[in-house]
Amino acid sequence: MWPSVLSHVHFGVTDLSDTEWAGHPLRETPIINFYEETDQAIDKVLDIFIRVNSGGTVLSYSDLLLSIATAQWDTRDARDEIHGLVDELNGMGQGFAFTKDVVLKAGLVLTEVPDVGFKVTNFNRANTAKLEQNWDAIEKALRLATGLLADFGFSATTLSAGTSSSPEAGSGSSGRTSSLSLAAG
């Protein structure tokens, strides 16, 4: 008796019998709560997608950025290339814990994208084309940097932040170009 009375009170319907209440539109119509988002910026859309999707397969921001790169690369499979490189880098020396985020961010830096923020607008067609065109040099630079870290005794246990070991940090005073030039040479 109490649950039916409470549900009547909750919806403000107090004069219906249990039989009438069973078929009442308030009871039969599912309630959907929503908030209309007027901002159509792709970063905002991805944040909402990640939040809504959190109950299913957990996707990170980098998963979505990687999907964009995969869709835009013409001659290579970005997903296979990046995952393969991450696995290779993590297997060097005593092991590292680099993520695809580090590889994607380093790729932006090494290809001299003016804004290297980790956001969707930086993974446009032109920038992803630069990543693909320079992929061999990016791989070489990251392998070289990771090899040096391993030679100096660093590993996942001694490097707590993956970005602290980005190869561009050691590119010298001439700027980011030297990392790719060194790798290409």
Image (tube, helix red, strand yellow):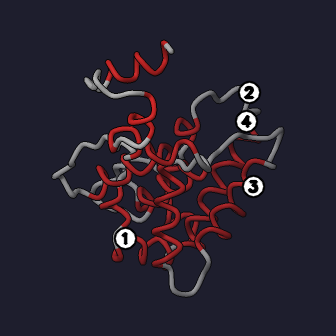
User: Taking 88 as reference, is 171 left or right?
Assistant: left
First of labels 1, 2 by sequence position: 1
Give the SS element for disc 4. Answer: loop
Q: Amino acid at mark 4?
A: Phe
Question: Could you tell me residue 90's position as x and y percent?
Answer: 75, 47
Instruction: Give the residue number, with chain letter if any, for mark 1.
Output: 127
In the displayed structure image, the side of residue 125 where residue 18 appears, left or right: right
Q: CA distance from mark 3 to mark 2?
A: 17 Å
Task: Answer whether residue 185 is visible to the viewer in this image.
Answer: no
Callout 2 amino acid: Thr
Identify the amino acid type marked 3. Asp
Q: Earlier in the sequence, mark 4 or mark 1?
A: 1
Q: Are marks 3 and 1 in contact (CB under 8 Å)?
A: no
State the residue in front, 63 or 89. 63
Q: Are marks 3 and 2 in contact (CB under 8 Å)?
A: no
The local secondary structure at tag 3 comes to helix
Q: CA distance from mark 3 to mark 1?
A: 24 Å
Q: Nearer the viewer, mark 2 or mark 4?
A: 2
Q: Which residue is at a point 36% across and 41% down the rendered structure image?
A: 24
Residue 28 figure quarter: top left
Q: Could you tell me which quadrant the C terminus lies in?
A: bottom right
> Are the two marked residues, 1 and 2, in contact with CB atoms closer than 8 angstroms?
no
Q: Which mark is residue 87?
A: 3
Residue at image mark 2: 157
Q: Which residue is under mark 4?
A: 152
Query: Distance from label 2 to label 4 (Cα)?
Result: 13 Å
Which of the marked residues, 2 or 4, is nearer the chain's N terminus?
4
